[in-house]
Amino acid sequence: MKMSKKSHYAEQEDRVFVRGIQGDYSLKEELKRLRSLPRVKKAENVPFWDGPQVYSKHYLEPADGLGQTIHIHVEEYGPGGVSQKHGHVNEAMFYILDGKGYEIHDNVRYDWEAGDVAIVHNNCVHQHHNADPKKPARALVIKTKPMYMFMNMLFQKTVIPRPKEPTEYGKDFVPRQERKKEVT
């Protein structure tokens, strides 16, 4: 059988494993740029997005220009809130700040509460649930997503989108904003 098209695995072909980085680059200029940026992001200046059952507050992501390897955000789950069911290539770690809930990872349930860490493995279809119908829950999320983006490993798919309506007890829910503590 004669093949009409050469395979991209042919030994004589060059293969590209990482996409090219082009443009001017000077470590001196990059360090100057990085050192000019703020080292502290004030919580009250970072807005919550999404809703009405799950809200996200992004502290560090590649678009900020502050870091290149991690993405950090807070998820706030309204009373009984449920996230979208989705999967992605990158790993994620959820440090549970308060509340109680559970994860469904590849159809297996994992319960969590404040102080626990929930790990989402690579290529896992998952969904996050607040188990308390009357109180919110929060998690600090740390992802390696920027590294996967750099390697052009961007597969991410939503299986079930985020709910568009609040839960019964979450109708008036507004995510908690951090406030400056008064020193007395």
Image (cartoon, grey):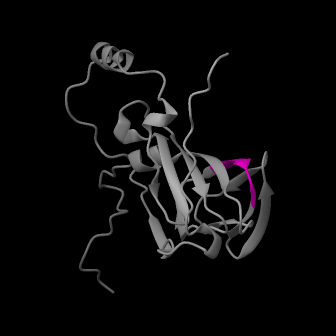
Q: Is residue 21 left or right of residue 133?
A: left
Q: Is residue 161 above or below residue 174?
A: below
Quick one: 13 or 160, which is closer to the camera? 160
Q: Quadrant of the C terminus?
A: top right
Q: Is residue 34 above or below residue 23?
A: above
Q: Residue 183: name its quadrant.
A: top right
Helix, strand or loop for the magenta stretch, by majority: strand
Magenta highlight range = 93-100
Quick one: 113 or 92, which is closer to the camera? 113
Residue 82: x percent and y percent?
Answer: 61, 69
Residue 163: x percent and y percent?
Answer: 51, 74
Residue extending furthest toward the bottom = 1
Q: Is residue 32 left or right of residue 128?
A: left
Residue 124 visible in the snapshot: yes
Quick one: 43 or 128, which is closer to the camera? 43
Residue 126 visible in the snapshot: no
